[in-house]
Amino acid sequence: MAASEKAREAYLKAVREIRDSVPKILINVGIAVLIWALTRYAFIPISRDYLLFNIPLPQLIGLVMLIAVAILILGVIREILDITDAAAAYAAYTIGAVRGEVAEEELENYRTGFRGIVYVIIVVLVFILFRDFLNVLHPLLSAVLLIVVVIWAVLTLMRSGRAFSGLVSYYTEEWAKRLESRLQTE
């Protein structure tokens, strides 16, 4: 099958994934934001003066919120990864159509690159969402987790960058050839 035909199929798959996943993402994100907002601005302030089994109620409420939102976020991540994989395949086959070929390794590199970038964005947003509630549980928890997230994000982005190195090399080579041919025609 030609790369252009695979690009068309990848495009159709990407459209189907978007059609299937975006409503699920929007609903789960909406519910998560609603739970987060109600917890932050209503439930925790109301519960500040209460204890349950000598445990401050804001900590328990924060923990319940973290668990509930984490479950919703996992569903969102699954859907986002489906869209990301479809977009990576589309990008690989579209760019491959220009060159006339797409290797399976190249497709996997696109997936690795796209997924890494998306993972980092998701984890950073989730950390921002959970940071205040982690502080309610214990400030050290939030600080340690932030350090772990930063180290992981740097390593993941480096891996994603390396995944795109073949693409960058190809276009750099093409650009250099055009510059050389322009120089020869002058």
Image (cartoon, rainbow, N blue to C red):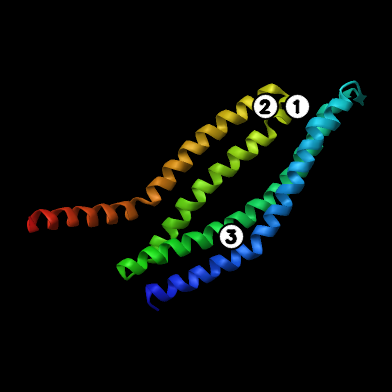
| Residue at 54% over, 65% down | 14
- Amino acid type at circle 2 is Leu
- As helix, strand or loop, the secondary structure at mark 2 comes to helix
Q: CA distance from mark 1 to mark 3?
A: 33 Å
Q: Which residue is mark 1?
A: 137
- Amino acid type at circle 1 is Leu
Of residue 37 and residue 3, the one placed in the foreground of this image is: 37
Of mark 3 and mark 2, the one earlier in the sequence is: 3
Neighbor class of circle 2 (other Cα within 10 Å; few <14, some 14-19, many 20+) is few
Q: Is residue 25 above or below residue 155?
A: below
Mark 3 or 2: the one toward you = 3
- Amino acid type at circle 3 is Asp
Which quadrant would the N terminus be assigned to in this image?
bottom left
Is the Cβ of the residue at disc 2 closer than 8 Å to that at disc 1? yes
Rendered image: mark on residue 82: 3
| Residue at 51% over, 51% down | 115
Residue 171 screen position, x and y as percent: 28, 55
Q: Is residue 65 left or right of residue 88?
A: right
Of residue 172 and residue 1, the one placed in the foreground of this image is: 172
Residue 89 screen position, x and y as percent: 47, 63
